[in-house]
Each structure stands twice: as structure tokens, then as C-alpha cells.
Image: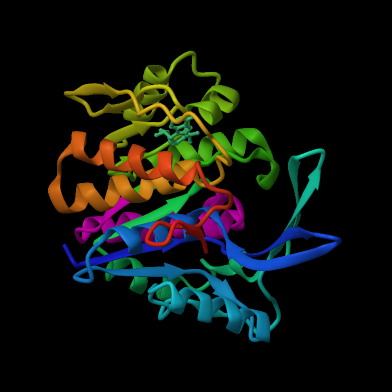
Amino acid sequence: MPSTFLAIGECMVEMAPTGGGTFAKGFAGDTLNTAWYVRKSLSQDWAVSYLTAVGNDQISEEMIAFLDGAGLATDHVQRMTDRTIGLYMIQLKDGERSFAYWRSQSAARCLANDAAALSAAMDAAGLIYFSGITLAILSPEGRQTFLSSLAAARRKGAKAAFDPNLRPRLWEDAQTMRDCVTEAAGLCDFLMPSFEDEEAHFSDASPSESADRYLKAGAAMIVVKNGPQEVIVATENDRRSFRPEPVRSVVDTTAAGDSFNAAFLAEYIVSGDVDASVAAGARLAGTVIQHRGALVDLSSGLVA
Ligand code: AMP
């Protein structure tokens, strides 16, 4: 397996309130969060690369500098001349966070337009990681390009990991979301849903039912996360469950699933040990949720 972990998706500008009507600028997005934690978890024998599309402007340059600074390879980042990156703003009201998005025209929506570039990146990867948000932001043609490039890369030996991250508002309709996610699941070695989403949008009665549905769709290993409850890992011949260590002081669950996926995959591609991989995922996610923000720098305990 080539030693490259390739994450594909959208990274946005994040405007986080700092009080008095001012905001701190950062960068975040579900697949970016996972790539960021994978980079922290894997040895330097592995390259961790992020594929997205950006504009030609200053804020796009700043995002690339941010990715570089995090140790992520940016050679597959595509440049659009007529678009720029998406943005979201976190708003606080009575201690509750809400989000406003400006992403409908973002450059990342075009990341599958150049099929040759997408295939070249996927073919060079050992493990390809993407999410339902990656698929949601693409056009219907872009999704088909994405999935056929993924299928071709897998035939050449790449593995694929997918978090459905179901966000119906990003899709044209809920049935298209369910159909596309089910099709993508059939191309995956690791399928990593959160039960809360699956229950809401596929009406699964239990995490085991989600695992069965994705096994039937053709995914090889299903890892169903369920907040503080048991994580289920299912393959055709094996099913296990693990209870994460309880976390008493949950501060912010942003990126719980993204960080779990990162540590799970980083451990699994090195050791192939399911128990150790779930333990690593739960340990990292359990730490991340004790801090505010998506990207928690564990070496200093500071939020990046
Ligand atoms: P989720 O995507 O919310 O299901 O969470 C992903 C992972 O984060 C879970 O599988 C747990 O390992 C961890 N996690 C989330 N919430 C909690 C919690 N309240 N206590 C302990 N671990 C949690």
C-alpha cells in the first residue's frame, strides 16, 4: 500500500466569536478535521494529503498556508479562477452555538470537475477518506466522476474510508442523499457512521441495524459510533462492541466523530487490530470533546 492517506472534501473559513462583535478567523471542515488528526497520529513514514479546490485569492493562499503548517500535503489542491473558498460563522445566543454558512458557490464544489486530476490523486493513495459532505457538495455528474474514480483506484489496490455524515440540507433531497450514500458504501473498506444521523435519516432502530444495512450495501467493515454509548464494529463474519471511557466534563462535541475516525484509521492501517483501533478512536474523541473547537492541539492542550 503506498504510504499516503488522502482526505478529500471542503475546508472553509471559520469565523468564531471572541466577544464584543469581533471574530477569530480559522479554517475547518469535517474531512479537514480528520486529516489534521491523522497527521498528528501517524508517523512521518506516512504522507497525509488534503484534496480540495480553492480560489486564486489571498484567503485561499492563507488556507493553503494553514494546511502546509499542519503538515498536510497540498499538491492535489486544485485552483479555480472564478471561485473562492466557503465560509461559516459561529453565532452564540444564551450559550448555544448556531452556524450560518456561505458555501453554495464555493470552489470545493468543483473538486471532481477535473476527472484526470482526481483519479491521479486517488491512484497514488493507500487510503482515501471522504464523507457524505464531500459527496453532497458535488453536482450529480461530479458525484459519478468521484465514485467511478474511487472504484478504479480500489481496483488498483487503494482502500477507502467513508463517514456518511448525513446533512440533508446540503443535498437536493433526502432520497438522493440516501441513494448516493448507499452507493458509496458499496465501494468502502471502512464505513464510519454516527448512529444519531443514521437513526434520523435511515430510520434505523439500532446501531446493529445500521451495520447490517451497510454490510448489505457492500461495505467491508462498519464502525458505528454512538456518542457515549457502545461503538459497534461489524464485518461479514464478526461483530464486536466497545464502550468508550465515560467523559464527565463534555465541553464541545464538535469533531468527536472526525477525530474518532482519524485515530481509528491511523491505528488500523498500522496494526490491523480492531480493538486497539477503537480504543485509539475513543481515546482521542474523548479528549477532543473536553476542549472547545474542532482542532485540539494535544501536544500543548491548546485549541489550534
Ligand atoms: P458521535 O459521532 O457523537 O457518535 O461520537 C464519536 C465518538 O466520540 C464516540 O464513538 C465516542 O468515542 C466519543 N464520544 C462522543 N460523545 C461522548 C461522550 N459523551 N462521552 C464519551 N465519549 C464520547
Which quadrant does the N terminus fall into? Answer: bottom left
Residue 97 in picture, x, y percent from top left: 73, 43
Q: Please tell me which residue lies in front, 166 or 42.
A: 42
Farthest-out residue, right: 21
Range of residues picked out in magenta: 133-160
Q: Residue at x 48, y 76 (%)?
A: 77
Q: From the viewer's perspective, is residue 3 above or below residue 213? A: below
Q: Inspect this view and state whether residue 27 appears.
A: yes
Residue 236 as seen in the image, left or right of residue 218 = left
Q: Could you say where residue 283 lies in the image, as x and y percent from the top left?
A: 34, 40
Q: How is the image coloured?
A: rainbow
Q: Which quarter of the picture shows residue 225?
A: top left
Direction from residue 108 to residue 106 in the image, left or right: right
Q: Between 189 and 275, which is closer to the camera in this rendering?
A: 275
Q: Is residue 142 magenta?
A: yes
Where in the figure is residue 12, as x and y percent of width and height?
Answer: 63, 64
Q: Quadrant of residue 38?
A: bottom left
* Residue 165: percent from left, percent from top: 52, 41
- At horizontal 34% and vertical 62% (from top left) the residue drawn is 40
Give the main secondary structure, helix, strand or loop, of the magenta stretch.
helix
Note whether 42 is above or below 249 in the view shown: below
Asked whether 20 falls inside the magenta stretch, the response is no
